[in-house]
Image: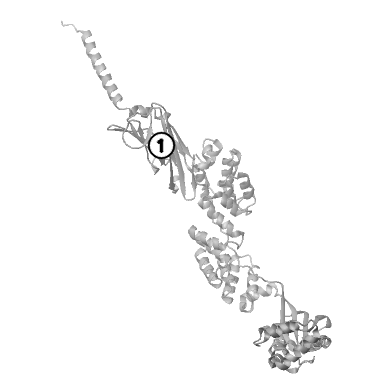
């Protein structure tokens, strides 16, 4: 029987174990990447902002890292890449790669010394909808000599705040207002001329065109039931007569002019009472004489006026004018006769048509109405379709008035018929090029059609048309990420957008006040914005109550809130998770 030699066998096994251990040691000693990966969790990575935020059309990201002493092998290199991944781990977006190198490694990159080191990198990328509900990680691929290793990912943060996308398309078009009044002043003027030193109204004067126009005016006043207010008569004498005589003559001419007008009223069976007449006899018309002389073609007119201006004595000046009239027939025949006159102005008021009359006429015969009457009639309707028909009538009957076309476009914007509205605003622009109200409205439809740059150009031309222009610019400010400007431009308007701008600008208390004063205070969007404000002010009760109200009005907001980075800090709160179904 042969006996076993256990001591020798144990020695053999021990040798094998020693060789295996030495081999393992050699492998790990030659590849420091495993050790770096094992310690990767102690590296401090920072994401700013966290969560990320949408500003304008892009998302900005800053990632920094600090490596402790003795972490980074002197001959190692590493490519550090921040990435966005969805809930399934799929990469949504890769950001700029950062190359790090050990202090003795070859190649370019940020040096990480034995004593440690750091890096920082900033990126800005266009926003995509897939970036909202994501996780952010740092992924590192390290290299040493010919070996490479992917380190375990390190979480950076969660999600992208997309609250600016709540901006509403509530651009404010501006109406072309009417100038309609319930009582409209009506007036007409005429002139009666007299022979020298006479106050008699010549029959030929009563056949002149301006007197015929007065008769027609009186007839129209009967038809439209004018209220006759006054007859102003200003009478003059030419400065070639004696002063005392001229003063009496001017007064007499005022009286005869009044009788002539009274006669015209009488023909139409209207009794013109004495208190209608406001007579102003002016005496000799020296200033009228100077004006006509200056406008004449008389060669010596400047010299004549200088000489006459030297006389302060009216009697002496009258004598010289007589002498000049004898010498210069043009003065006697063309300058002096028109100065012997009475200027008449009849004033009346016309009561406007009743609202019912206007409504009937705008439907049956709008051509009988002025633009002011039609535009006013549109204000009598609340229904947008009825308003639209009235404005269309104005645009058709008064095509040269920009307001009809503009107001048709205004209603079409409210009906969300943007392309049709734009065509109407273009017509308004042709009727009145450069009208600021039209520029504002063109800006509104241009923005609604997706052209923010074009809208901005129109709004620049529209400045001064009203506070609506600034409000519309405020919408562009929100979209561009300029929240302070948006708050300023939206001023005292109480709207969802104004509250949103204040929220984004950090003025949460003002945002709540604005929202509560707006029409959005009790709709789904308004409640959701209040929930966001609650999250930003760490008010859990405000978050839960308003989110509940928002979801009750719009159940789709449950999924929205579930992935909204505004509520990151509430994803472990039972009341929140119950609401959104997490």
Is residue 191 shown left or right of residue 415? Answer: right
Pick the front one: 206 or 388: 206
Pick the front one: 98 or 418: 98
Is residue 412 shown left or right of residue 88? Answer: right
- Examine the rendered structure and indicate whether residue 106 appears above or below residue 554: above
Residue drawn 56% across and 37% down? 575
Pick the front one: 292 or 518: 292
Q: Where, by quadrant of the figure, is residue 121 drawn?
A: top left
Q: In which quadrant is the N terminus drawn?
A: top left
Q: Position of residue 402 (x, y in %)?
A: 57, 71
Q: Where, by quadrant of the figure, is residue 438 drawn?
A: bottom right
How many numbered badges does the structure rendering display? 1
Residue at which label 1 appears: 138
Residue drawn 76% across and 91% down? 322
Is residue 183 shown left or right of residue 149? Answer: right
In the orientation shown, which residue stands out farthest toward the left? Answer: 1
Pick the front one: 497 or 241: 241
Secondary structure beneath dot 1 equals strand
Residue 222: tell me if it is visible: no
């Amino acid at each position: 029987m042969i006996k076993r030699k256990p001591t020798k066998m144990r020695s053999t096994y021990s040798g094998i174990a020693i060789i295996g251990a030495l081999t393992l040691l050699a492998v790990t000693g030659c590849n420091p990447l495993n050790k770096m990966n094992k310690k990767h969790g102690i590296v401090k990575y920072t994401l700013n902002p966290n969560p990320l935020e949408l500003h304008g059309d892009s998302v900005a990201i800053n990632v920094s890292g600090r490596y402790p002493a003795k972490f980074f092998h002197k001959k190692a290199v590493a490519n550090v890449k921040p990435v966005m991944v969805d809930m399934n781990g799929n990469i949504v977006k890769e950001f700029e790669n950062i190359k790090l190198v050990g202090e003795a490694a070859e190649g370019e990159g940020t040096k990480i010394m034995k004593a440690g080191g750091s890096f920082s990198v900033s990126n800005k990328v266009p926003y995509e909808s897939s970036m909202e509900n994501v996780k952010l990680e740092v992924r590192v691929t390290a290299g040493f000599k010919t070996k490479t290793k992917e380190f375990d990912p390190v979480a950076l943060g969660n999600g992208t705040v997309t609250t600016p996308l709540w901006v509403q398309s509530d651009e404010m078009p501006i109406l072309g207002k009417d100038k309609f009044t319930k009582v409209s002043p009506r007036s007409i003027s005429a002139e009666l001329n007299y022979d020298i030193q006479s106050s008699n109204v010549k029959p030929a004067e009563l056949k002149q065109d301006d007197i015929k126009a007065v008769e027609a005016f009186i007839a129209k006043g009967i038809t439209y039931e004018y209220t006759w207010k006054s007859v102003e008569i200003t009478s003059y004498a030419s400065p070639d007569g004696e002063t005392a005589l001229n003063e009496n003559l001017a007064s007499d001419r005022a009286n005869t002019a009044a009788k002539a007008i009274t006669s015209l009223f009488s023909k139409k069976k209207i009794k013109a009472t004495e208190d209608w007449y406001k007579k102003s006899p002016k005496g000799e018309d020296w200033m009228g004489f100077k004006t006509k002389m200056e406008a004449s073609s008389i060669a010596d007119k400047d010299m004549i006026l200088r000489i006459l201006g030297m006389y302060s004595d009216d009697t002496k000046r009258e004598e010289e004018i007589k002498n000049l009239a004898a010498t210069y027939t043009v003065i006697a025949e063309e300058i002096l006769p028109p100065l012997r006159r009475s200027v008449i102005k009849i004033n009346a008021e016309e009561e406007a048509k009743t609202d019912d009359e206007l409504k009937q006429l705008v439907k049956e015969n709008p051509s009988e109405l002025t633009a002011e009457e039609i535009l006013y009639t549109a204000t009598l309707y609340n229904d947008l379709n009825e308003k639209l028909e009235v404005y269309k009538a104005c645009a058709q009957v008064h095509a040269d008035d920009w307001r009809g076309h503009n107001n048709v476009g205004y209603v079409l914007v409210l009906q969300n018929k943007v392309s049709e509205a734009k065509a109407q605003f273009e017509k308004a622009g042709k009727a009145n090029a450069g009208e600021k109200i039209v520029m504002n409205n063109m800006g509104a439809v241009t923005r609604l059609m997706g052209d923010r740059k074009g809208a901005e150009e129109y709004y620049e031309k529209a400045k001064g048309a009203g506070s609506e222009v600034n409000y519309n610019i405020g919408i562009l400010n929100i979209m561009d990420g300029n929240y302070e400007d948006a708050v300023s431009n939206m001023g005292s308007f109480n709207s969802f957008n104004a509250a949103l701008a204040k929220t984004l600008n950090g003025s949460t208390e003002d945002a709540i006040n604005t929202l509560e004063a707006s029409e959005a205070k009790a709709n789904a969007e308004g409640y959701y914005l209040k929930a966001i404000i609650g999250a930003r002010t760490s008010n859990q009760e405000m978050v839960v109550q308003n989110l509940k109200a928002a979801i009750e009005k719009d159940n789709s907001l449950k999924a929205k809130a579930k992935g909204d980075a505004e509520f990151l800090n509430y994803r472990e709160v039972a009341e929140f998770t119950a609401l959104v179904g997490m």
